Every structure is written in C-alpha cells, then in structure tokens.
Amino acid sequence: MIRPSLRSLGLTAFASILAMTTALGHVQVMAAPVEIKAAPVSELVKAVNIPYSAFTLKNGLRVIVHTDRKAPVVAVSVWYNVGSKHEPKGKTGFAHLFEHLMFNGSENASGDFFEPLQQVGATDFNGTTWFDRTNYFETVPTPALDVALFLESDRMGHLLGAVTQEKLDNQRGVVQNEKRQGDNQPYGLVEYAQLEGLLPEGHPYHHSTIGSMADLDSASLEDVKNWFRASYGPNNAVLVLAGDIDEATAKAKVEKWFGDIPKGAAVAPVKVDIPTLSARKELVMKDRVAQTRLYRYWAVPGLDSADRIPLDMAAGVLGGLSSSRLDNILVRDEQLAVRVSAELQTFAQLSFFEISVDVKPGVDAELVSKRLDAIVADYIAKGPTADEVARVATRHIASTISGLESVGGFSGKATQLAEGALYLNDPEAYKKELDAFATTSPAQVTRAMGKWLTRPVFAISVVPGPRDAYKEAGSAGGERAGITSGPALYLDAAEADAIAAGLPLTAVDRSQLPPVGDITNIDFPAVETITLSNGVKVHFARRTAVPVVRLSLSFNAGHASDGKGRLGVHSLMLAAMDEGTKTLSDVEIAEAQERLGASITLNGSMDRTVVGLSALSANLDPSLDLLADIVKNPAFEEKAVTRVRNQRLAAIAQELTQPQAIASRTLSTAIFGVDHPYGRPSSGNGTADVVSTLSPADLSAFHDAWIRPDKLEIFVVGDTTLADIKAKLETRFGQWKAPSTAAGEKSFTSAIPIATPRIILVNRPQSPQSVIYAGEVLKASGTDDLLTLTQANEVLGGSFLSRINMDLRETKGWSYGVRSAISRYENQVPFIVIAPVQADRTGDSITALRTQMMEFLGVKGVTPEELKLTINGSVRELAGSFETSEAVLGQIRSDALYKRPFDYIETVAGKLGGLDAKALDSSARNLIQPDKLVWVVVGDKEKVLPQLTGLGLPIEVVDAPK
C-alpha cells in the first residue's frame, strides 16, 4: 500500500501544545481579530518532550523506546531506509513490491502476516512505501509483543527462503490492480505527469512509487532477492517500541528476536538535486472529469532545509487554511472556483509545493488561470501577515495533538521518533523543528517564497473530455494454488519441507510463534449522564491523556431526513450553517477557529446529523461560544447560500464521475427503492435537480425542523470534568427552546422492492477497472443484536483474511481488495459486497464471488480455524481499540444510537467467547440470501458486457449519469 508522506501530519505541527494550551486562555470570539497575550512560544516549546531511550544492536539495528502506560498496548514500528528513490533504472516499483511480499510469509511464519496479527488482536497495522522509506507498524496488546517482534524479525532476517516465483507473480498482479484502482479515479493520472514534467529523467524522485509495470513484469526471482539483500538489513532500519514497555524489557526482547540477524550491505546515500525548470511549462490533459482543475507545481527543498517550515507556512496561508487567500478570493469573493488547496508535500531530500483549483462550471478556465497566477505573484511579493502565520501555526498544533494521543498508527508518537531518527539521525529532531516553527516570521516566509517560488512553474490543466491514450497495467497471469476456505498460505507442504531443509541456524527458537499471555478485558471509561434544563441529555467520559475536549451534538436527522423528492436539502443546509451567523461572517468564523485551534465539523450519516467540536482544553469556553452560534444562529444569507449551492452542484457532478460513487448511488436505489429514506446516495449530496432549486428559506425551514433541542443528544469526551462541562453546556444549550414550528419526522413506511436478482451495468468508457457492488436488504435493523452476524461477515468478507478477499486478491490477483459489510442503519440493514477488479476479469470475479458466498452459506460454513482466528482477534483487539478520545466518543454515540448500555463494550468479550461456528453459520444463513443479490458493475461496456452474458442473470445497461 502506498501512503502519502506523514510529514504533513508530523513534527512541524507539534510546535507548542503546552504553550498554546496554557497561554491562550479564555478568548472571546468577536467580529474582529482578538490579540492573544501569550508568553513567547519559543520559551514554552522547550518544555515539549517525548521521553525516550535508545540503543543499537551489534548488527546495527537502531532501537528507540518510549514508555506510555495509559493503555496495555505496545506500538511496534519498523522503518527501513529504502523507498522508490533508491531504485535504479529498470527496477522501479521494487520497494513497493517488497512491501507486499514482506506481508506474505517468511521462512518461519509461512502464511500471510495478517493472520497471526489478527489472532493476537493487533490494531493500527499496515505497511506503506513512499519515496524515502518503507515502514511496517502494528499496535498489539502487551502480552502479544513477542509475537509482533517474532514476525518483524523473521521478515527482516529470514525472508528469502519464502519468496517463490508463485508468490512473486501473484503480488505483481495485486500491485497492478492497486495501480488500476488509482488510475481509474478522476484526475488519477496527474501524479505521473507531475513527476515526468517537473523532474528530469534519472532523478531519484522522477518515477512514481508504484513503479513501472514493465519493470516488475521483467524482474526475475533472483533480481527481486538481490534487491532485498541490498536493502533490508538491520543496519538500514529503525525499530521503535512505544507504549506499555520500558527500556530493560525492550532490550531483552529485541536482542532475543533481532540479535541473530547478520548486518546487511551498507546502503549508499542518494544524491538529490533540486531541479529548476528553464522556463514555465504548460500541459493540458483530458480526463473524464466534471470540472477543469488547474495545478501549479514547484520542486523545493526537503526535510533538512531551513526553508522548509517557511514554505509549509506559505502554503497554509495561500490555500491550507479555511480562510486562506485562495479561498477568500477565488471561492468566496469572486466565485471563480469551487475548491482550492495549497500544500507542501515534504520528503527527506525534496518537497513539492502544490496548488490546485477546481474551476467553477461555466467560468472560463483561462481567465481563472490568469487570476490564479496574479494572486500567487502578489502573495509572493508581499508575503503573509503576522496573524496569518499565527493561525497556520495554531492549526498545525491542533491537528497534530490528537495524533499524539496514540502511541502508534500513522501519526502517533512512534512515528515522530522514527522519522527523526531515520531522516535526520536524531530522534529529537522535532525539538529543533519546534524551535524553528515557533520563531518563523512573516519576513522569513516571504524570503523563502521569493527564493523558491519565483522560479518557473509547471502548470497542468485537466479538462473534461475522453481520456488521452493510456497504457494499461499488464497482467502477470500468476494464480496461487491452494484452498481458500481458510487463510491462504503462500507455501504448501512441499515448499515448506524444502525450505526447512536449508534454513540457517538461528539464535532463538523460531519453530512456532511465541505464546500470548493473558489479555485482560477492556476497562472502558465510565460514562456519566446528566440532563440540561430543557431536557437535552449529555453523556460524558473523562480522558486526560492530551489537553483536548471532543464534543458531538447529535441530532436525530441525517440523510434520511430528506423528504421524498427533496434529496440534498439536509446536506446543503449543513454546508451553509458555518458560512455565516447573525453576528459573524464566514471568514470570521473560519479565522476564529484557526486562532483558537478549534475544529468544528458538520456531518451527516444516514440516521444522524452530527456537529462536532475538537477544542484545546484552555480554549473550551470560546470554542463552545462559536459552536453554539453556528448551531443556533445560522444566517443562510443569499450570497453565501448561492456560493455553497454552486459548490454542492459541482461536488455532485464530480461524484458522478467517480466509479465507486456511481456504483453506490445505483445500488442504494435498486435495493431500497426511490421512495425509501435509505434509497438515496450515502454521501447525502442529493441530486442536482433538487439542489439547484433550494433557497435560503428552504434551508432555514429545514434547520428549524431538524436542528433543534428536542432532536438533540450531546456526547463529550476529554480533558474536563462533568461539573464543568455541565455548567458550560447549560449556559449555551440548556436554555435553547425549540421553535414553534413542528419538528421533522422520518417515515419508513415505503415498501422495499421485492428482491429481483440482476446485473445493472453502468457504462463508463475507458475504465481500466470494473467496480462491482452487490447488495440486498436484510430482515434486521441496526438496533438488533448483530454481533454474531458481524462475526460471520468477518469470515466471509469483513477482514483482509476473509474468504472473498483472499480469493480475488491473494489467490487470483484480480483485485487490490474485496470486502463485504453489514451497513448498520438504524431501521433497516443492507448487506453490501464491494469488489474493484481488473476489467478483463469482471465476469470471472462475479462468478467467484457468487461461488464463495453460496459455499459459505451452504456446505462450507465457518471452519474451526476461522472461528478461532475471528474470535481471538475480535476479543484481543479491544485492548487497543479505545486508546484515543475520538474512539471512545464514537463508541458511546453508537451505543446510544443502537440502544445499548454504555458499558456494552465491556461485555463483548464474554459474548464472543460463547459463540461457536454453528451460531455464526446460522446467523448468516438466516439473513443473507446470495441468490437475491442485485449486482451493479461500473465499467467499460465494450470490455465488460460480453463477460456478463453467460452468468445467467438479467442484464440492464445504462449510461453513466451526467
């Protein structure tokens, strides 16, 4: 899997959590900026610290240990100094290919690594490859740490005997489908053009991380093994252990599992220049997109440059803040664009300064292009204001603080330490960055822009039209043998015996996985409930790991509250609520959030409308003031509504170019019917014919009907007390009275259509991949006890190791990932299957999915091995599932929605322990009827239709919506 650089979530944002949370104090939200008298951030930053210890094994493996005892889990994070920039010509894509191969069995752990990880209850586990590095990470219960270290050390030191031609061929197929999945998206080919046009041939960052399919197809097994020998030694890696562990324990365990691995070859440093174009370069690309998108790119310095932080702040002011220059000018004032962004994508030795603008439909793109260049030129010349720089810094702090509540994952403390060690040879590099971040001035930002952004730009325009000539990913043609009723093994018995005969001696017994110690049941935070004067219930759980309070105002509305023929009112109303109140403008609201380090979000699920707040504890009062004003006093001013309506219409048009969105829209209507509250797009965006007619009065009336205290329930988790939050909420929401108009009511009386099995083929020409959705409405509601059914679905399609994913991805190599889900709507539950597959295997994939489901629900039910894997994983993962306040908040909201007690999660382990295979089989067979599924295929009719005619199902062919 390829992931974006974690630098955007990284050390720069940490600036001064302690400084801001103690110094900002209580700030009144006013129409004009408020001067915050705080102690100098540069002084307070010195107190920010992630304590750690470090040691190095004789083989060169660097180990960093951070102790955090708040939960009985340990994050294991292994970072290798090898990425796509290290690949020579003719071997592009090798680093990413090895990320896949290293998940698929080693000499002493011959199956997919996800199996033992799931068995022990690992959370936050994944692997990523990018230009500079490859990393693997998982968070495991403390008694399972030895299992994680066994697996990581075995793939580091004992991998090559398990790399076979069959496995290589299979994973090439998976990678090709990963490429197809990305390429199939609107604007999906831009990255290739960006790298090709901005960097010269032979530059280490010139090629995409996913690499050349021709290079991968031509690679021999020995080529691949030699790449591993040259790149993955312990002396080229950093191991971080963060969580419920200390240095002494870590030393003993790491020496035990990694100490026998010999030192590898030294990896030579890569020389990277920052290229400058000789003149402005323009490129026009055609794609099946809804709006013209303008891009601007510059290659600029990387992580170790003094100009990086000023350039990062420059991007934030230009197009990163909600109140950014481009937002205010192009979107709000002149209304020439519907979406803008600017960011610095930072890597170790080079960065990309990127701007993108989605042109408003009907507006001349050339005019917008010229206006964009004029705005950027003026900004580069004059620079940002001190207030803009301060707001960017505060936004970074607030966005990072929640990540630091976790020990692992994509942005936790293990990541912070590993990045500093790997890229700068200094786990405490963040301290130097914090000092630089705290003292960056507007003048420094202006100088950095003048130095780097006055150089020639690479400008790309993507315009609507048939996609230009496109080279499809090849087909490796390798299929893996073996059964799929259980986790598929890459090594059959004969291969395992052959490998065992030639294994090198190891210093530790690797004949079996280490035992897992006793894992205690989860101790979920106590949830206290009080009632405000007007009857609104408040549910509170205290968490003090970070100085943040998270709050959700949950209204019983959601997308299902849109009336018949009124699809999109709810979504547009939400989008307009924070675009101005009776006392604050849209810009003032955005700036207030940025100054406070607060984030107010307005979102809808199918059953609930949630207005969320994440606030620094010290700024909770003014943040709540702002929240209350947005919720209770939206202005719905004509100009703002017109602008938001145009943006929503553009979003709907964009949605209708995305294959997954098209499939989802088509399926929901097919299985629920057009009149049912759930027979609508799950995005909630609605339809253009409705949204185009909505007026401010419509939105105001909808707000009065649904956003009101008699529809409200409040959930709070974080660094405060029940008494304190009760007083604050009573002041702001306890006296709120419902309007005299009637409250809205959802009606679920519309009959669900009788299931008519068929295939609906939505013609989307030039699709390198077909997106398959299948679904049916089950005779169950979200408030039913669905624990047994969800466990059965884990076996069928709910996890990486599920039958349908292992078959189509790992055995056949036709997909990057396949899954099934129980969509837990409050009143009626659908069963959904999602399978993006290579276009030439569409018909075969539907046949395989139908076969797998019929067998699972028939003669090949849950096996003892599958039961053990699923139950063990579900029970043991509880320890690491609620490390963050966000996870706790989500759980108590779910408990309220599904009418469960707030200690429900503490009873889950006992319930799961009482399940057997018969119970799982019975639950699935009683509810899921695979012969009643409606199938939706979004793909190229010319390629796909001939594959569907022999499947024995009626076929409807429709054009992609416009």
Image (spheres, rainbow, N blue to C red):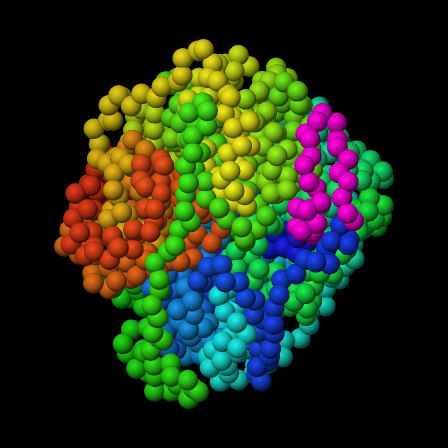
Q: Residue at x 60, y 38 (%)?
A: 620
- Can see residue 416? yes
Q: Residue 516: image x %, image y %?
A: 35, 70
Please give the count of numbered marks on the rendered protein.
0
Above or below residue 353? Residue 513 is below
Residue 221, image x and y in percent?
Answer: 45, 74
Question: Residue at horizontal 31%, vertical 24%?
Answer: 676
Question: Is residue 231 left or right of 365 when viewed as pictured?
Answer: left
* Chain part drawn in magenta: 15-40
Magenta stretch containing residue 25, yes or no?
yes
User: What secondary structure predominates along the stretch shown in magenta?
Assistant: loop
Residue at image point 43% right, 30% down: 531
Q: Give 384 or 337, whichever is nearer the viewer.
A: 384
Residue sitting nearer the eye, 89 or 270:
270
Residue 530 coordinates in the image, percent (x, y): 43, 34
Is residue 200 shown above or below 188? Answer: below
